[in-house]
Image (spheres, helix red, strand yellow):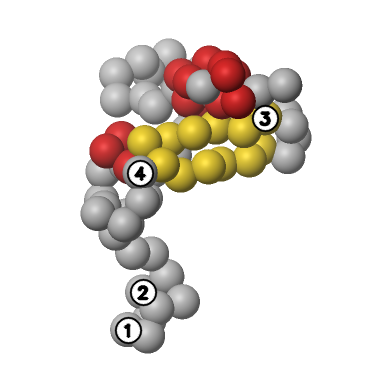
Amino acid sequence: MQPDGDAQRDYKGEVDYFGVYCHERREVYLVPIDDVPGKAAMLRLAPPRNGQVKGIRWAQEYLLREVAPAYVA
C-alpha cells in the first residue's frame, strides 16, 4: 500500500510493460503500459455471458508467445 493509503499507482514513465501470470492457465501475458488506462486494467479470458465485445481487453492478444515469440521456449 502507498503511504497515502492508495493501493494502486500510475506506472507511466516508469515501466514499459506489465508481466501478468495466470496460474490456472499457466500462461504469461505481456501488457504494454500504454494499454493500461489509469491505475488498473483487466484481461478477459473468456467471453462475457452478455455477449459484450466493445471495450474488452482480451488476454489472448497479450499472450507472451504471441507478443514476443522469440522469448518463449
User: Which type of secondary structure does the marked residue at label 2 adopt?
Assistant: loop
| Nearest the eye: 47 or 69 | 69
* For marks 4 and 1 on the same chain, the one whose residue lies earlier in the sequence: 1
| Nearest the eye: 16 or 60 | 16
Residue 60 visible from this viewpoint: no
Q: Which residue extends farthest bottom?
A: 3
Do the residues under discs 4 and 2 have CB atoms within 8 angstroms?
A: no
* For marks 4 and 2 on the same chain, the one whose residue lies earlier in the sequence: 2
Q: Residue 6 got which mark?
A: 2
| Nearest the eye: 39 or 73 | 73
Do the residues under discs 2 and 1 have CB atoms within 8 angstroms?
A: yes
Q: Which residue extends farthest front?
A: 70
Cα separation between marks 1 and 3: 33 Å
Front label number (3 vs 2): 3
For the residue marked with disc 2, what is the amino acid?
A: Asp
Q: What crowding class fits label 3: few (fewer than 14 Cα within 10 Å), some (14-19), or many (20 or more)?
A: some
Residue 73, how many percent across, how many down?
Answer: 72, 21
Front label number (1 vs 3): 3
* Residue at which label 3 appears: 27
Left or right, 28 with respect to 16, comes to right
* Residue at which label 4 appears: 16
* For marks 3 and 2 on the same chain, the one whose residue lies earlier in the sequence: 2
Say above or below: 43 vs 65: below
Cα separation between marks 2 and 1: 6 Å
Residue 14 visible from this viewpoint: yes
Residue 47, how many percent across, how many down?
Answer: 51, 18
Cα separation between marks 4 and 2: 22 Å
Front label number (4 vs 2): 4
Q: Residue 4 got which mark?
A: 1
For the residue marked with disc 1, what is the amino acid?
A: Asp
Cα separation between marks 3 and 4: 20 Å
